[in-house]
Image (cartoon, rainbow, N blue to C red):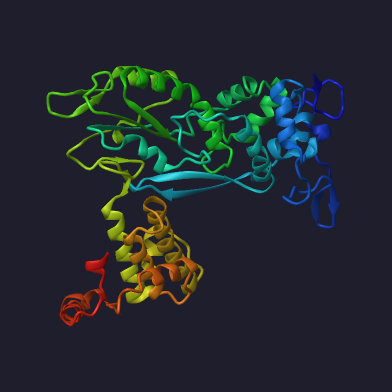
Amino acid sequence: MHNFALANKKSPDFISELPQIEPKPYSNGHKIKWINHTLTSTEVTPPDNLIKICILIESGEIAITSVSDIANLLGVPAGQLLYILYHKKDNYRTFEIEKKNGKKRVINAPCGGLSILQTRLKPVLEYFYRPKKSAHGFIKGKSIITNAGMHIKKNFVVNIDLENYFESISFARVYGIFKSKPFNFAHPAATVLAQLCTHNGKLPQGACTSPILANIASASLDKQLTQFAGRKKISYSRYADDITFSFNQRNIDIIKKNDDGSYSLSETIDNIISKNGFKINYDKFRVQTRNTRQSVTGLVVNDKVNINRRYIRITRSMIHRWTDDKLKYALLFATEKGYQAKDNNHAIQIFRNHIYGRLSFIKMVRGKDYPGYLKLMSYMSHNDPLKTQEGLRAMKETENFDVFICHASEDKKDIAIPIYDELTKLKISAFIDHVEI
């Protein structure tokens, strides 16, 4: 076994020696600059053989023990690394986004050198993380679709939300991850990495390293709930902070029915979750029975993985608005969502991107040949001067229509539908939204 650091001397107490190794300031006219200048994504690259290094770390042939080891692993001078972590003040940009329930979600997005360092660390985390079968969030080859697919055609679907999921994973917990298997990093190295990956003592929403570390921190929870589900012959999955159980016979070890007909979560599940350092958000606890619409991570699972019809209707309505008066509704959309459009063209671009994003989601869930998707995409493409390749494909797939009726919402009843009815009588194939979409 050998140290990864280029120097073989014992790792210093890096906190006390920080003033000696931090970047040195010098005067440049009226400004102060640093000899060890600002890190950029193109200046220093991590080792090309990063995976080989990870293999050697995993086998125990390389020991990560010091700050220098971490600096070498990330391809950055040690002084620069410590300066970014302990002296630089503007490492994060904080902003809010609106949740579906109207509340605000705080996002802490890393900036500058810190963002670059986290991006370089991410492949190392991905190498060492071994996903549990039950975990579906932020994992290559998995998605909300694979997560929802675990719970098709079940009599009971139970949704549990973990409250403040990322924020509940503390600096100490992240430090413990790097100290234990499979990393086994020494105290100085684990401390620096925990500092690199946390903000105000917890995992920040907005850092590229947070989802993987959250999954690693949840591995014990996944293991225990998977074992529990296996004993009870029920299905269990987790997508980030969304936990789902499903089964056909009412299971008293999961839920219990109250006198008023509502359901409560059993203490068994509550205890497993709390012992793993998480807390349940009971405002989002739901039990969905077979005779109601059952959804998992936003997808309907009663008979197959499907999209909520309301999502389709809203998408169709947005395309109507785009067709009717794109500027008017783009400005309204930007105002409703709190987007800061630079000008009218920017507002239109934001609205357009949002519509195409919704269409892409429908395509992802239902497939590229789903008729409903093709008709919506074709409808949008017919009314978009900047046609996409996918839009042109959809238009070609729906060429079986002789007439494509586009109309303003107020003209639908008195003009568009009568025209459609007359064309139908003449056996002319016509497209109109309320029939074809």
Q: Identify which residue is drawn at 12% across, 23% down.
A: 259
Q: Is residue 327 visible?
A: no
Rendered position, 36 above or below 266? below
Is residue 221 found left or right of 114 in the rendered image? left
Q: Identify which residue is drawn at 25% across, 73% down.
A: 432
Q: Identify which residue is drawn at 43% across, 62% down.
A: 356
In which quadrant will I find the C terminus? bottom left
Rendered position, 416 above or below 376? below
Is residue 113 found left or right of 283 in the rendered image? right
Label total for image: 0
Q: Is residue 239 visible?
A: yes
Rendered position, 208 above or below 128? below
Q: Position of residue 123 (x, y in %)?
A: 65, 38
Is residue 54 found left or right of 166 in the rendered image? right
Viewer-side residue, 107 vs 62? 62
Q: Position of residue 147 (x, y in %)?
A: 40, 38
In which quadrant will I find the N terminus? top right
- Which image quadrant for residue 66? top right
- Which image quadrant for residue 336? bottom left
Rendered position, 375 above or below 116? below
Q: Identify which residue is drawn at 36% across, 52% down.
A: 366
Is residue 112 found left or right of 165 in the rendered image? right
Q: Position of residue 170 (x, y in %)?
A: 54, 27
Q: Position of residue 392 (x, y in %)?
A: 45, 71
Viewer-side residue, 200 vs 279? 279
